[in-house]
Amino acid sequence: MTYDTILTDIRGSGDIKTGVITLHRPKAMNALNDQLMDELGCALMGFDRDDSIGCIIVTGSEKAFAAGADIAAMKDYDFQKVYGSNYISRNWETIRTVRKPVIAVVQGVALGGGCELAMMCDMIFAADNAKFGQPEITIGVIAGAGGTQRLPRTVGKAKAMDMLLTNRWMDAAEAERCGLVSRVLPADKVMEEALAAAEKICSFGRLAVMATKEAVNATFESSLSEGLHVERRLFHSMFGTADQREGMDAFVNKRKPMFNK
Ligand code: DAK
């Protein structure tokens, strides 16, 4: 499969590897247009189906993860076009259906739809030059790809309101302090660290990895008691897997486990 707006690569030293997707519209700071979102969705689904891939990384350039939805493309859209074509929902949410973990590696700006795309990933590793913002208000719209929902759940209402209403940007250090990103690293180290984390994920049992992601995500979609119920059922189901027997036997017998990948 060849793409025009993304690059794909497979990295890692073990049997199970990491699929890396790099957003690549350098002249437009990786602004997210329909073609890019279609290609991203296609690459994500390809890696998700591929049994030799255990984890996926989505990244951009040193200057921009993504500067948001493509404003030049959107400027002439009207209600009929966006509602009729199911704009955003049609191809931006493919990432939500991916069952393997997805790590966003953010260098430079993650603005508007770029910040929203990063938040759709399972965790964000940020370079120390990363900046997060939701500037949609400055162009007469609102965040439309989950920003008004995921940002307050992640950073709290006060900071989310501040970012969404005043176009205040957050730097990497603040983003880490308030839980938007999981790790901050020097720009020249962030991809290395993400690949090492991905390799660690690839070394664990595939079913336990996918069930962990499903259980954590359940908390965003439900009440606490519903989330706990999902977690408990998934935990119970682990006792039907060979990896549970292998993992616990290996621990008791002080040997390295051999998981199904
Ligand atoms: N779209 C299109 N082109 C963009 C772009 C964008 N979002 N961001 C940057 N570019 C282009 C610039 O136009 C410029 O192109 P040329 O003039 O060279 O042809 C090139 O990238 C380099 O940008 P700058 O010259 O501006 O570079 P600087 O370093 O000076 O500034 C910047 C970088 C990222 C601070 C600046 O470019 C900027 O402010 N960009 C816009 C950021 C922004 O406002 N992002 C939010 C986009 S709105 C919806 C759902 C979702 C959304 C909307 C509706 N519905 C359900 C209806 C989401 C909306 C958004 O994400």
Image: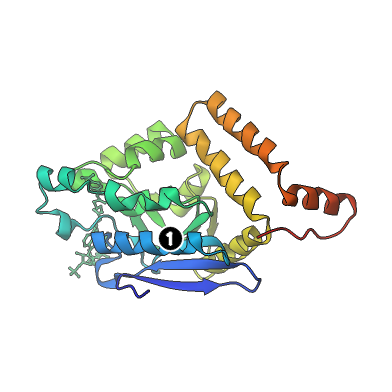
Specify the amino acid type for callout 1.
Leu
Quick check: can you spot residue 140? no
Residue 21 image-quadrant placement: bottom left
Query: Split into 4 quadrants, where in the image is the N terminus?
Result: bottom left
Q: Residues within 10 Å of mark 1 (few under 14, many from 20)?
A: many
Q: Position of residue 109 (x, y in %)?
A: 35, 59
Q: Which one is in front, 55 or 235? A: 235
Tag 1 residue: 44
Would residue 256 be found to the left or right of residue 199 on screen?
right
Q: How is the image coloured?
A: rainbow
Q: Which one is in front, 236 or 62? A: 236
Residue 71 image-quadrant placement: bottom left
Q: Position of residue 78 (x, y in %)?
A: 10, 46
Name the secondary structure under disc 1: helix
Q: Position of residue 158 (x, y in %)?
A: 39, 32
Q: Quadrant of ligand 1?
A: bottom left
Task: Identify which residue is drawn at 60% across, 45% down.
Answer: 211
Task: Identify which residue is drawn at 51% across, 48% down.
Answer: 176
